Image (tube, rainbow, N blue to C red):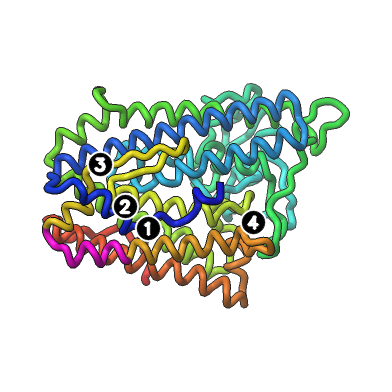
Amino acid sequence: MQAVFKVMLATSVFMAATAQAGVSKEQVVDQYAEVAHAVFSDALMTAQVLRKQIDVLVQQPSETAQQDARAAWKAARVPYQQSEVYRFGNPVVDDWEGQLNAWPLDEGLIDYVEPSHYHHEMGNAGANANIIANTSLKLGGDTLDLTRLTPELLADLNELAGSEANVATGYHAIEFLLWGQDLNGTGPGAGERPYTDYVTGEGCTHGHCERRGQYLQAVADLLVKDLEYMQGQWAPDGDNYRAKLQQQDPQQALTKALFGMGSLALGELAGERMKVALEANSTEDEHDCFSDNTHYSHYYNAQGIENVYYGSYQRVDGTKVSGPAMAQLVAQQDPKLAKSVDRQFDRTMANLQRMVDTAEAESGMKFDQMIAEGNDKGAEIVHGAIDSLVALTQDIEQVATTLGVNNLAPDNADHEF
């Protein structure tokens, strides 16, 4: 398992790719779509496994069942995080992803919280709604019926009252229901929700255990349904988004791919997911804050960027999808730049691997510890990852220019680097 997380050197991927000389932009776009289909297929498959493990936890609660569900959640994050590079530049993904991966969330919307450790968005009317504990919710002059916790209801409650902090669905809602709040701040340890939160009858802890199980099953069902939709949008030989993308001028499709790579690297990963948390020493801005899985989420975001550039993806079953690559187009036009980009991918993945290795060591330092005030070593690790992603984005912009895309302007999410 550990080998899965080791850096796959970009140069070796490049050498395999360049064995096929003379690729066209049309071929690269086709492979971009093929990798997307493989990634979303794996995200769907691992979400289906997660749903089954959640059913076991709810139907037969035990510590083992809870640990199995948590492990399934972490496994499901591996392909999904690699899919996020498709979000930027592809409206079909960007418009959809808020129901799957929105964060940070005001968890009091969903369930009980420890008030002394709960910091919610100011003015959020849903911050303490506690859907699990209540069968109705008054909002303004309306009363919402929460009696039946269905996937459809939860989808309607997501971003309740227009607040992005009211996250009722997706991976992070499931994460919270499996781990609970992380009450350790910047100290070691993740959330410690007891499995007895799902025991019905006298063994129930924190009340409303049956409804908590219903919520968890409904949100898992919705996750699977949403991923079924997106996998279908990238399936071959269909009347779907993939078909429309492949019918476009390949230059337009390449622009989408490059914009996605640069925007994820710069504004989202380096900025929103690392810089914000580090500068504010804020665990509230940690991506996988309940499970302390953030280091892996960051790593696999970067891996997703590499996948698009090299036209390859290692599936969860160990098989590999590979084909005509953007890297080959660059090598055909500017071999010197191609080698420079290879080296920068190697540096970037090595810095993200260092973050993973530090977090997974015997006396590991997780991301929420790295960002603690006064933790110079942690800050140096996070800064190293940020700096390499910024440099990678600069290389991506050079790649864009080489391929005829001027003024790529990746989204920096209003961050300065």
Mark toward the start of the polypeptide (2 vs 4): 2
- Taking the magenta stretch, the answer to whether it contains residue 200 is no
Horizontal arrangement in the rendering, residue 3 relative to residue 241 (left or right): right
How far apart marks 2 and 1 lie (CA) works out to: 7 Å
Mark 1 is on which residue type?
A: Leu
Q: Name the residue rendered at 73%, 53% in the picture.
A: 115
Q: Nearer the viewer, mark 1 or mark 4?
A: 1
Q: Name the residue rendered at 68%, 33% in the picture.
A: 132
Q: Are marks 2 and 4 in contact (CB under 8 Å)?
A: no
Q: Name the residue rendered at 42%, 63% in the picture.
A: 270
How far apart marks 1 and 4 lie (CA) works out to: 41 Å
What residue does disc 2 label?
13
What residue does disc 1 label?
9
Q: Which of 311/32 is in front?
A: 311
- Taking the magenta stretch, the answer to whether it contains residue 340 is yes
Q: Are marks 3 and 4 in contact (CB under 8 Å)?
A: no
Residue 98: image x %, image y %?
44, 41
Mark 2 is on which residue type?
A: Val
Horizontal arrangement in the rendering, residue 158 relative to residue 143 (left or right): left
